[in-house]
Amino acid sequence: MTLLKSFVVVTLSAATLVAAAKDPYPSKPIKVIIPFPPGGAVDTFVRTMGPELATELGQPIVVDNRPGGGGQIGAATVLGAPSDGYTLFVAEIGTYVINPMIYKSISYLPMRDFDNITMLAQAPMVMYSSSSGNLKSFDALKDAVKLGRELNYGSFGPGTAPHILGHALGKAMPGSKFVHVPYKGAPPAFQAIMSNEIDLLFDAVPGTLNMVRSNKGLPLAVASAQRTEFLPNVPTFAELGFANLKMDLWIGASVKKGTDPAIVNKLHTAIEKVLTQPAVWKRYADFGYSRAPMTPAKFQAYIEAETLRYRPLVVDTGVTVD
């Protein structure tokens, strides 16, 4: 055997050994970073699908809650890990779209820092009043505006989706006197609407259903193009003359930029297989979520489109966070 042939054989053998030694993905537990406290919508969503996703991927799914900083603490955890698919980021529209616009020194940008996997679910926003309050219909709301009445609407904090949607409604109703009342999270806002401390609250279908089913909330309008199957008797804002008032709460999954596309696709396939299982999706449907499957490329484009759509409105609120 010539020297050249010996070199080729040795090189090919070494390459084969390296390939064989490399563990197939996944070969260890997968961590899911959630930038919210335990018990919230995103946390509950991930923990609900966790066991089935672990079975599909053949590795444990470890949920790691890293709340704070408008998603920055959780994002920093993901960006500080290798781009190997073992650290996922699961968040919602606020973290992906709104927060990067309102935080002056944001430490992450979704389009720059993440390879986005898929949208897990979505649910339209709903405007509702207290069942014991004076606003029993959208017509009653319009009458209050005509009379020049000051109307307080709550949110889960400055710059959150309820704040943005309430601000948009105020702009769409000339002469209205909507007053934004921010609360520190959802629980105090729910308490405020039940006690008639505020007149209106905006929340996604899952949160609204909890209030409606307990006879605490009265839905007045849905911010979607079509009526939601979960509240079929509630008109859309478009039906009421406000075609541009559309907003969905959506939850998505991503990994750090630079992750092998084959790994991104494997995660996408596994997640979709789990979410299409009838028994699994029934749990989410019971919460009030709708399916919105997307390829990684489509989800990436969707985030970009959402960012462009909301930027003028978010800027108009004047909200900034240091």
Image (spheres, rainbow, N blue to C red):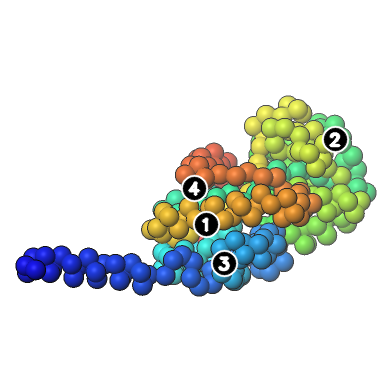
Closest to the camera, between mark 1 and mark 4, is 1
Q: Which mark is residue 233?
A: 2
Label 1 sits on a secondary structure element that is: helix
Provide the residue designation for mark 3. Answer: 58
Q: Position of residue 222 (x, y in %)?
A: 75, 38
Q: Say which residue appears at 90% left-offset and 54% top-offset.
A: 214
Q: Position of residue 284 (x, y in %)?
A: 73, 53
Q: Is residue 155 above or below residue 71?
A: above
Q: Which residue is at the front of the view, 68 or 166?
A: 68
Q: Say which residue appears at 75% left-offset and 54% top-offset.
A: 279
Label 4 sits on a secondary structure element that is: helix
Q: Earlier in the sequence, mark 2 or mark 1?
A: 2
* Measured Cα–Cα span from mark 1 to mark 4: 10 Å
CB atoms of marks 3 and 4 within 8 Å: no
Q: Earlier in the sequence, mark 3 or mark 4?
A: 3
CB atoms of marks 3 and 1 within 8 Å: no
* Measured Cα–Cα span from mark 2 to mark 4: 35 Å
